[in-house]
Amino acid sequence: MLRSEQREQTRERIVEAAVDAFVQNGYEAASTRDIAARAGVTQGLVTYHFDSKATLWRAAADQVFTGPSTPGLDLPGTDSSPAARRAAVREFVRFNAAHPAFFRFLFDAGRSDDDRMVWLVETHIADRFTQFSDLVGADVAPHAWYALVGAASLLFAVAPEVEALTGLDLSTEAAIDRHSDFVADLFAAFYGA
């Protein structure tokens, strides 16, 4: 393996470990020492690849929002059919079922009024929200956006609580399909379907 490939693999391990640490502990409580331990690297390698915890957080955010399995975040345009819109909502729910870290990451960043939140909105959320607003209408967009994001993801973000309270195992295809249909049915009103 080439040295450049090893560096890239090390960087990827650090970013994956950072996503886990930021999701589990929040930005403030996560430490680069913990991230290094999770990645199986030295603290020096973390600082070699990332000059600060903030820079590492941005790389983790990029991974969460633009990683290989993120296409579920995109909704169809205003001229799409109701069936295409329903499929997009179902795909978004399925994305959240497979990636509960998405909501946890959003929640941690979104409750802080700081540079990280502003960067996240400007870099990864604003364009999606604009597309969504065009789809549902500006008057309901803020309410519909957070209703959709919450409905599609909260259940999976707190899956242990859901199972303890209701007995519902959210790891099953049947449960994921049921929730996907439920959210798509709820959201159909905003699409005019």
Image (tube, helix red, strand yellow):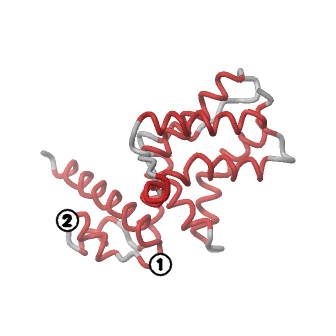
Q: Quadrant of residue 18?
A: bottom left
Q: For numbered disc 2, what is the local secondary structure?
A: loop
Looking at the picture, which amino acid does disc 1 mark? Glu
Q: Residues within 10 Å of mark 2 (few under 14, many from 20)?
A: few
**Residue beneath the point at 83% across and 40% down:** 137
Residue 43 percent across, percent down from the top left: 25, 75
Vertical relation: 6 (above or below) 83: below
Q: Which residue is mark 1?
A: 28
Q: Which quadrant of the rendered structure holds the N terminus?
A: top left
Question: Which residue occupies 76% across, 26% down?
Answer: 193
Q: Nearer the viewer, residue 79 or 167?
A: 167
x then y, percent, for residue 160: 42, 58
| Residue 82 in view in this figure | yes
Q: How far apart in space, not on screen, are marks 2 and 1 (Cα)?
A: 21 Å
Identify the residue at horizontal 20%, vertical 72% (top origin). Answer: 42
Against 139, residue 81 (above or below) is above
Please name the residue that numbered disc 2 is placed on. 40
Report the side of 111 relative to 175 (left or right). right
Whether residue 112 is situated above or below residue 157 in the rendered picture: below
